[in-house]
Image (cartoon, rainbow, N blue to C red):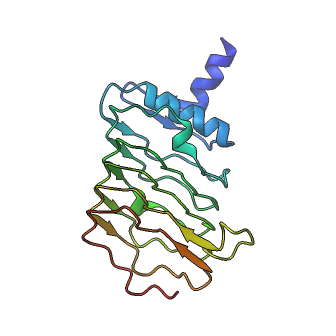
Amino acid sequence: MLFFSLLVEKLKITKDNISVNQQLANRGELVNYLQTLINDTNDDFVDLTNVDCSNIDDLSDIFPILDVTSYIKKIDVTGWEVSNVTNFDNMFGSLYFIEEIIGLDTWDMSSALTINSMFYKCLKLKKIDLGNWKLDKIGTGTGISETSLSNIFSHCENLEEINGMENWDLSRITRVNLVFWGCYKLKKVNISNWNL
């Protein structure tokens, strides 16, 4: 009973949703928390708002780890505290049935070192609003993945519009590879100020 009381204290549980009451300590705790929210929905929309990841620096492969079933079409990630996260590689990769990811425009991406394959094979995704992410540290790492920009939107076959990429500072990137490969329906994206 004590364990359950501590869990309820850690995660503020309400009738309508579950919201984080304090910081998540690590990736494992984040995965368990997100899986609980996903399992508790019978809808095609999952509210994942206001997750505090300030103690986590690696969000790579987070959603592919989860059992995100085919009935989930839309997720809301508004207000995630990601300002200390450095690795976003493949974060939403292979979410084949996701049509909309809401709230990415609220993210502070100032510590991001790598975002390779972040939306890889989000086959049904139609529009992404990145809200002018500031990627000041992209390309400053030492590993190959930290100096390249690869496959971010590859195989997003239904993606028609990407907003917020126009002012990315990519001056330190040494390799750009297949960023929009397989985006057959892409009509609107502005990369006019990229300084490669």
Indicate left or right for 175 with 99 as reference: right
Q: Residue furthest right?
A: 142
99 versus 13 height, above or below: below
182 versus 149 height, above or below: above
Q: Nearer the viewer, residue 194 or 59?
A: 194
Indicate left or right for 172 with 183 as reference: right
Residue 24, percent across and down?
63, 42
Residue 104, percent across and down?
41, 58
Q: Residue at x 54, y 55 (%)?
A: 81
Residue 126, percent across and down?
28, 56
129 versus 92 height, above or below: below
Q: Nearer the viewer, residue 51 or 144?
A: 144
Indicate left or right for 124 with 121 as reference: left
Q: Nearer the viewer, residue 160 or 18?
A: 160
**Quadrant of residue 74 in the image?**
top left
Q: Which part of the image, by quadrant, shows the N terminus?
A: top right
Indicate left or right for 120 with 56 as reference: left
